[in-house]
Amino acid sequence: MAKYLLASAGGVCFLWLIAGLSPVQALPNLETENKNVAIYQDVENHEKVYFNKSNLANAISDKLPISNESQKKLEVDSANNSLQAITPQSANSSQASDKLAQVTSVSQLSDVQPTDWAFQALQSLVERYGCIAGYPNQTYRGNRAMTRYEFAAGLNACLERINELIATATGDLVKKEDLAALQKLQEQFAAELATLRGRVDAVEARTAKLEANQFSTTTKLNGEAIIAGIGATGGAPNKSDPNFILVNRVRLNLTTSFTGKDLLITGLQAYNFLGGADGQGSLQQSLGLASPLLSASSARTSFEPQFPGLNVNTLSGVGANSVQLYKLLYVFPVANKLTLFAGTAAETSDAFPTITPFYGEGQESISRFGNLNPVLRVSGGTSGTGLASAAGFIFNISPNLDLRALYGSVNANLPEKSATEAVPGVSTTPLGAGLFSGSSIIATQLTFKPSAALDIGLNYAHSYHEINILATGLVSSDIGALAGLAPGTPVTLNSVGGTLTWRLSPKIALSGYGAAIFVDAASNSVNASTTFTSWMAGVHFNDLFKSGNTAGILFGQPLYRTDASGSAQLGENRATPYHLEGYYRVKVSDNISITPGAFILFNPEGDSRNETTTVGVLRTTFTF
């Protein structure tokens, strides 16, 4: 064997060089070697970037500056926050970063020097036979160890190249001793070559089958199904405990990219929660903790829509498990650091990074209180039904500083307000009409990352409502925000808040938020104002007891009316409400998780007469 290897510099020294030829050689498979790593494909620069899953949402946000999701896991809650969960890919996007690039001159390989012992052999293989490949970053990595399969793959590449030379009447370039050496090597590696050819045939057959049965070249389909059992005890005085209930919510998301950089999100959902205009059929109403209209309550779970069983735009009913369009949003970059978005069914959390690790309607906190800062929920900003038509921008000031803003209008599709009244002073289109004439919101968030372990989000929102509500769905006093004034009183809201997450280690994070909502009567004929405040603090655990399992313990104060002036009232039997919650998410498989948990409400709805209330949840989430 040795005499063949020394016969000429032109062919046989590739025994050491052949690793660079192998078409199956690739970067380390981080997906399987490290279960905490996820991949983002940069379709603009044709390269893969690897991120820790716990920061996947922010990583995606940096690459295509859209919203941050929960986004923190490979099975991120894409149904809850589509922008955070989906990475757009062009139908023609290349996987070039894993492939080896053909070179025509040895000088193209930056890590090969004339002083290297194999330089002449490598030069001859490149320039005479053209069967040497390098990595996209112009390196050869000649010192890398290889397997027999990799050697066989490289040998096969050279054999094919020699056959081409012979077929094109350039066989005189192939030396006799080279052919002899190749024949010897071909015999010795016959088994490996046959195995590789079999694998290639299998891959080609599989690829042809996938291409023939693919859903779309531009669109991906994913979904989430939640099935949960909910039980509760306590509530208002003289109320019996409600029955244990079984509920569901199913979402299907179509994500389409036309250029590889843009993203069109179309979301469909169905659920069997009830409530309607008066809250009938809801768990909160059975507890006696819901508002008389729209069933707002602090006893609401994270995956329940804000207005269950109701189209709040027109106060018409929505049947259980009827299919609705809950998301329609288009995101597209217009400059290196600027991305725009617009859609007719959108939510604030689609564009704003959520910061807190407790966010994830199907994966993390089981309560509406624990998921997000109340400022993000103002004006139906997280209704769960894509309530608003919205447009806005995302500006990446720097890798550590991000500014986002949007304008949203709730009834942009209605040309005029209904003349019919649902209740005195409130029409059957209670949120008004028109893109700029009805209830609307201007919201912004500044996200700051002073270090890898610290995320800070600062929020401000200015809202106008045709009726006297906060539209957060968090507490019963959400309806009739200016207590003592008529439901049809228009109001303006100025809301400020901040959210902070500090990762003490890869497995433990402290997170919390604070919020204040200042409500004023919008009519010059009425002098009334009030202030609501809320705060939350908690500890989040990753990989608790077992890899993939998460848990959270959180405590805080739900929205509470702390001040009132003018015609507004504070209310009677006041007592500061508190919320205590714990949950543990068990990852059964990559697509199934089970989350048992419970939250306790002290002085629920800020009323001292209400009994301490406990809500228990057993949530099963399927992602696909």
Image (cartoon, grey):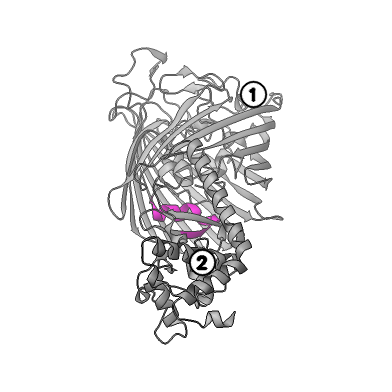
> Which residue range is magenta in the image?
49-65
Left/right of residue 356 with respect to residue 555 in the rendered view = left
User: Can residue 572 be seen at all in this image of the molecule?
Assistant: no
Nearer to me, 597 or 607: 597
* Residue at 67% from the left image edge and 55% from the top image edge: 547
Residue annotated with mark 1: 286
User: Tag 1, which secondary structure?
Assistant: helix
Left/right of residue 428 with respect to residue 548 in the rendered view = left
Q: In which quarter of the image is residue 302?
A: top right
- Quadrant in which the C terminus is drawn: top right
Q: What secondary structure predominates along the stretch shown in magenta?
A: helix
Residue 82 percent across, percent down from the top left: 46, 41
Residue annotated with mark 2: 154
Give amino acid for label 1: Ser
Q: How far apart are marks 2 and 1 (CA)?
A: 72 Å
Residue 270 percent across, percent down from the top left: 54, 27
Between discs 2 and 1, the one toward the N terminus: 2
